[in-house]
Image (cartoon, rainbow, N blue to C red):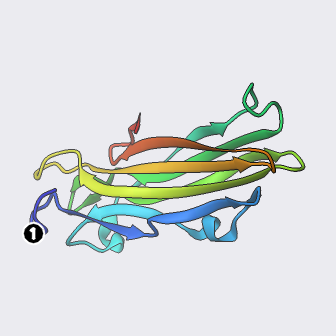
C-alpha cells in the first residue's frame, strides 16, 4: 500500500469482524455491521457514484458430510465504483446477510465474518480498492464439529474473485 498522502492510499471504515449467525439464528449485531474501503484522505460522504452489487455465497449445502441437517446460504451486498474527486473505484459499504438457514435439531451453527485489507489493487493514479471477506461457519453436535471457510476478494470495480 502507498503512503497515506498518495491518491492510492486506503483506509477501512466500519467493523472488521462480526457475527452473522449465533446458535443457528441471525445475529442482530450482524445485521447492522458493515465494512468499507475508501481513500485515506476522504470521508465516506465525499464519495460519489457508487453502484450496488451482490453475490450469493453457499457456505454449506446438504451433502455427505452432514446429510440434510445443515444448509447455510448468505449474500454479500456491496457498494462499488464510488469515486473521490472523479477518480478511483472504492467500496463504501460491504455487508453479509444470511439468506437461507436450515439447522436441524441438535445442531449448532455459528457464522462469523472477518474483513481483511484494504489494499490498492490498481495504481496510485487509478486506485481500485480491494478487501478480503472471510466467512467462517462452525457446525457442531454433541459428537463432532467442523469449521468451513469461504473467502472472497471484493474489488472496487465490482469484480469478485475467490480469496
Name the image quarter holding the N terminus.
bottom left
Residue extending farthest right: 105
Quarter of the image where one finds residue 49: bottom left
Residue lying at the far top of the rendered structure: 64
- At a point 25% along the width and 72% down the height, the residue shown is 42
SS at circle 1: loop
Q: Mark 1 points at which residue?
A: 5
Residue 6, horizontal then vertical, whole percent: 9, 63
The residue drawn where x is 46% and y is 69% is 15
Q: Residues within 10 Å of mark 1 (few under 14, many from 20)?
A: few
Figure quadrant of the C terminus:
top left
Q: How many labels does the image show?
A: 1
Q: Is residue 51 visible?
A: no
Q: At which x and y percent is residue 103?
A: 82, 47
Viewed as shown, does residue 93 lie left or right of 109? left
145 shown above or below 32: above
Q: In which quarter of the image is residue 48?
A: bottom left
Q: Which one is in front, 159 or 66?
A: 66
Residue 160 locus on image (x, y percent):
41, 38
Amino acid at each position: 500500500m502507498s503512503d497515506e498522502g498518495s491518491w492510492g492510499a486506503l483506509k477501512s471504515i466500519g467493523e472488521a469482524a462480526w457475527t452473522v449467525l449465533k446458535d443457528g439464528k441471525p445475529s442482530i449485531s450482524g445485521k447492522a455491521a458493515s465494512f468499507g474501503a475508501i481513500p485515506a484522505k476522504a470521508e465516506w460522504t465525499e464519495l460519489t457514484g457508487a453502484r450496488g452489487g451482490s453475490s450469493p455465497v453457499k457456505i454449506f449445502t446438504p451433502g455427505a458430510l452432514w446429510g440434510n441437517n445443515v444448509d447455510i446460504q448468505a449474500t454479500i451486498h456491496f457498494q462499488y465504483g464510488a469515486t473521490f474527486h472523479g477518480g478511483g473505484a472504492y467500496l463504501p459499504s460491504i455487508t453479509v446477510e444470511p439468506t437461507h438457514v436450515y439447522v436441524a435439531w441438535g445442531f449448532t451453527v455459528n457464522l462469523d465474518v472477518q474483513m481483511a485489507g484494504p489494499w490498492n489493487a490498481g495504481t496510485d493514479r487509478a486506485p481500485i480498492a480491494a478487501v478480503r471477506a472471510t466467512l467462517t461457519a462452525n457446525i457442531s453436535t454433541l459428537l463432532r464439529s467442523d469449521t468451513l471457510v469461504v473467502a472472497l476478494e471484493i474489488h472496487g470495480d465490482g469484480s469478485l474473485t475467490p480469496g
